[in-house]
Amino acid sequence: MIQIYNTLTAKKQDFVPIKEGHVSMYVCGPTVYNFIHIGNARPMIVFDTVRRYFTYCGYDVNYVSNFTDVDDKIIKEAIEEGSTAEEISKRYIAECKKDMASIGVMPATTHPQATQEIDGMIDMIQSLIDKGYAYAVDDGTVYYRIRKFDRYGELSHKNIDDLEGGHRSIFTNGEDQKEDPLDFVLWKPKKEGEPYWVSPWCEGRPGWHIECSVMAKRYLGDTIDIHAGGEDLIFPHHENEIAQSEAANGCKFANYWMHNAFLNINNRKMSKSLGNFFTVREILDKYEGRVLRFFMLSAHYRSPLNFSDELMESAKASMERIITCESAVLDRCGKVIEKADLSAAGEETVKALTGFKDAFCAAMDDDFNTADALAAVFDLVRYINTNIASASDADAAAMNGMLHELTQVLGLDIEPAVEQADAEIDALIEERQAARKAKDFVKADAIRDQLKAKGIILEDTKDGVKWKRA
Ligand code: AMP
Ligand code: ZN
């Protein structure tokens, strides 16, 4: 039985799906105004792994993760660059998808975009106004009336009166048409030069919180199994989503709320605003995507994780141990076997492999404890290293299957192929350098084109020729 720590109840609970055999899951995605940083990659990797484990356990997972493609930061970036918000978000959605692929994050079942869902947002806001949960003020701004929603504060375990104390100053910020300092924006009027949509209240754009309520409803239904995101989203974003969805739909919004802890640097949250971040792209210049993924999975998702060169180097070494084991498996069996078939294996082997798998599943069942699941993978690796050479064909095949089965649940690519490919590229570059030296420019250009066709871009630097993947 899978157990999940539910932020709403502050307890680990058995996972009971709404519909047997199905999981509906919504994960708040990034605001796309720049390359994502590795802090943003943490929820992506963690919840992709949750999804993979549910799938492994036989569930059909409907996984929805949005892109916030209209927002102050995107508009600011567009103005600075002299382009449009649409151009900026389109570019960084494409870049984000490339990063996701590099770190083994599968595309969601649906990746909705806020700007494509405006009609649904206008409908939900109207229904909130009709039911008395929202109100429009003179300039066309629509606010959510939090005092009307009894359960406000339930997710973040906060008391409204305590919260009010901290928000008094809002009244001095020109938002004095609000009935209550905690009331939040559902719709706001456009400013000069900003993207806008026509609505019953004014030409303007939606607030941030409403988009997730609307997309979750449209793609997953009024009540969903799991809603997830980073812990900074608990308040106010997820609290506000609950207030919107439950008031509009008249039923519970999400049964389980999962939140990952921060990726820190020097024990402070990595964030764009603090400037203490590395983009996924920067890290991928130095490490393979699977090393970054391993690093993220080496801690429990609810524990803070401090980024450091030492931990990345240790993740790299650990990943290499698994890849070396995979090389031995491939030498012995000649091919990858995706799933373990224990039916023909010997009794001892079945017992050992079942033990590793049970330990792996027990760790994952316990609120997705990937750190302990990795420990089970290393026990398996050690066992394979000791036994594969002398194993019977059926036993070797079973080991092969188990190694792939378990590492795939974690989304870890263990194939040595990437390194071989790198070596091949290095060899071609050397060949091209030799051709250039021999003034055989036709051959040198042909090799450059051949590499280009493989998506490899060459750069002549003062330290020699460097290459990167396009
Ligand atoms: P944002 O684009 O800032 O809305 O963030 C997208 C997702 O990344 C959200 O789920 C955030 O909670 C999460 N996130 C942002 N920074 C970090 C961090 N340093 N560690 C973990 N998660 C983060
Ligand atoms: Zn959200």
Image (cartoon, rainbow, N blue to C red):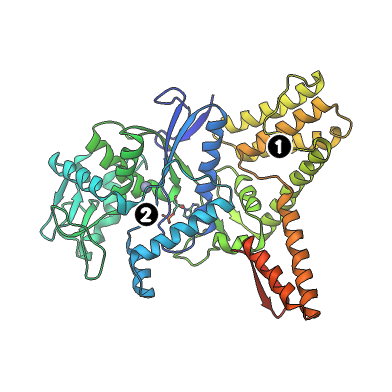
Q: Which residue is depicted at the point 54% across and 62% down?
A: 279
Residue furthest out toward the left: 138
In this picture, is 421 found above or below 131?
A: below
Which amino acid is tagged 1? Answer: Val
Asked if disc 2 and disc 1 are in contact, CB closer than 8 Å, the reply is no
The quadrant of the picture occupied by the N terminus is top right
Q: Which residue is nearer to you in this view: 418 or 373?
A: 418
Q: Which residue is depicted at the point 73% across and 76% down?
A: 464
Local crowd size for mark 1, using a 10 Å CA cut-off: few (<14), some (14–19), many (≥20): many
Q: Quadrant of residue 25?
A: top left
- Which residue is under mark 2? 68
Q: Is residue 366 visible?
A: no
- SS assignment at label 1: helix
- Which residue is under mark 1? 377
- Position in image of residue 236 (x %, y %): 34, 49
Residue furthest out toward the right: 390
Q: Is residue 378 visible?
A: yes
